[in-house]
Image: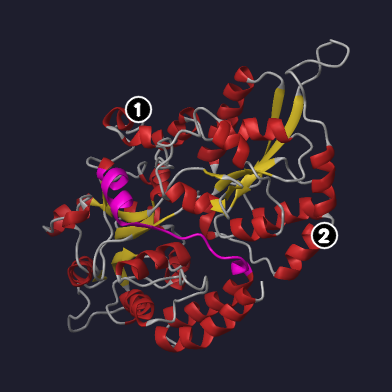
Amino acid sequence: MQQLNRTNKLTRRDFLRATAGFAGMAALAACATPSGAPGASAGGAIAAPVEITFMGWGGTEEDEGVRAAIDVFQEEEPNIQVTWLHTPENYGEKFLANIAAGNPPDTAFIGSDIYRTFIRDGVLMDITDQLKADDLLGAADYFIEPQESERCTQDAKWYGIGSCWVAPHIYYNADIFAEAGIEPPSNNPDEAWDWDHFVEVAKQLTVDVNGNHPGDAGFDPDNVDRFGVHWPTWWIPVHSIIASNDGLWIDPDTGLLAIDQPEATQAIQALADLVLVHQVMPQATAMEALGMTNTQMLENGKLAMAIDGSWALAWMHKINATLGTAALPGLKHPATNMQAHLHSALAATEHPEEAWRWVRFLATPFYQTQFCKIGLWLPSQTALMTDDGLNTWITEGVHPEGYRQIATDFVTRFGHVLYQPVGWNEASGIITPAMDAVWIGDQTAEEAMAAAVPQANEILTNS
C-alpha cells in the first residue's frame, strides 16, 4: 500500500498507444473456450494446471503475504497455478508496457486513480455476473456498503474488487508527549482535536536547537531540532483535510475537479501554512536533507506527530519508541480519505474463469485478515468489523491500544471515498505543480487552483 503515493503520470497518448490492439486481444479472450472441469482434458487425461499471472506492487510485507496466499490458493485450487509478477518500482509504466507488448497479466493490482480510466479503455474484465452469483461475495451484507459498490462499479457493472480500506490518521511518539506534559490526541473521533488546538500543540512540540518554539523571540526555523508534525502533500492526505472543511475534490454533478472552490482552497492553504506560517512542519527539502523517513524521525525524536496512511502501521509499530495513533484533526469536523487499490482480471486474459477464481480468493476473509494482522490494511468486509471479527486481526504489539476505534468509528463515520475520474493521470500533470507552488509559498491556494483547475478540467472533459 505504500506505493499509493508513487503514481506514474500516464497521458492519454500513453493509454491509446498501450491499449492499441487491446480490443483484438479482448475479442480473442472472449472467443477462447474456458477450461472445463478442473483437471480434465477431452481425452480424460489429467491436464496440466492452468497458469495465470498476477502483477502488483508492494514492499516486503505485501510481497510475502501474496506469496503465502498463492500457496493456500493452490492447495484449494490445484489446477490453477498463479505466477506473482512483483513489480515494486515504476509499476504503472511496466504494466502498460506489458499491455503494449501484447503480454498483459491475467490479473493485477489496479490503482484507484487509474481504475475508471482502465474501465473506459476496455482493459478490465466485467466480473458482474460471477460476483452476483457467488454465494459468499455476492451476499448482500458481505462488503461494507455502499462504499464497496461506489468504488468498484461503473454503470452498475463490477470490474474489480477493492483490496481493503486504508485511511490517513495520526501516528505520534507518546514518549515526547509524556516528556512535554501534553495530553496526546485520541483514536475516538468524537474527541478529535480542532485545527487551532492541533496547531497550538504542534507549536509546543516544535523546538529549535536553542530550545525555542515557533513564536518565541529568537526561534530559528533553519535549525529545528524537532518538528511538531509532518502532513504529506500528495492527493490522499490533502483530500483528507479538504473533506474536513466540507470541500470537494470532485463535483458529483459534473464529475470535474472542484478544488478551486473556497472550502477546498481554504483547506489547502491551512495545510501549507503549517510550514509557511506556523513553522511546525518541515519542507520536503528539509526531510531530504535529514535523510530520514517520517518513521525514522518519529523514532529518533525529530518528529512528534506523523500523518500517514493506516498502511504505515505495518512498519511504524516497529519503532523503538512508544507509538500512539489518533483520529485526524479537522477544520470543521474530523475527516479522512478512504482508499485502496483494487484486484481485477484483465479483459484480454485467455483464462477468464481461472482469473475470476483468483480475484475471488483475494476477496476472502483469509487474504484480507493476514494483511490486517500486520497493520497494512483495514477491513472492507463486514464480518471483520464485528467484535468477533476484530479479535481475529487486532494484534497485540502491532495495533496500539484503542486502535480498533480507527477502523470501526473514525474511518466508517468520517471516511470520504475518492476514486479519481477518467483522465486524472494527465490532469494531475497540471494540478501537482500548481500545488507545489502553494507548498513553497510562491502562490496562495486560491491563486494556484484558480489557474490550474480549469486547465485540468478541460483535460477531463475531453478524456
Q: CA distance from mark 2 to mark 1?
A: 46 Å
Q: What residue range appears in magenta?
A: 405-425
As drawn, is 417 to the left or to the right of 431? Answer: left
Q: Which residue in the structure is indicated by mark 2? A: 20
Residue 356 drawn above or below residue 333: above
Q: Position of residue 190 (x, y in %)?
A: 18, 55
Instruction: Tell me the quadrant of the picture where the C terminus can be found.
Output: bottom right
As drawn, is 56 to the left or to the right of 122? Answer: left
Does any portion of residue 444 appear in the rendered image? no
Mark 1 residue type:
Thr
Badge number at residue 392: 1
Q: Residues within 10 Å of mark 1 (few under 14, many from 20)?
A: some
**Residue at image point 66% right, 46% down:** 87
Q: Position of residue 128 (x, y in %)?
A: 60, 42
Q: Position of residue 130 (x, y in %)?
A: 61, 35
Number of numbered callouts drawn:
2
Mark 2 residue type:
Ala
For residue 422: magenta?
yes
**Residue at image point 79% right, 47% down:** 26
**Residue at image point 80% right, 63% down:** 17
**Residue at image point 52% right, 70% down:** 255
- The part of the image, by quadrant, that contains residue 181 is bottom left
Q: Residues within 10 Å of mark 2 (few under 14, many from 20)?
A: some
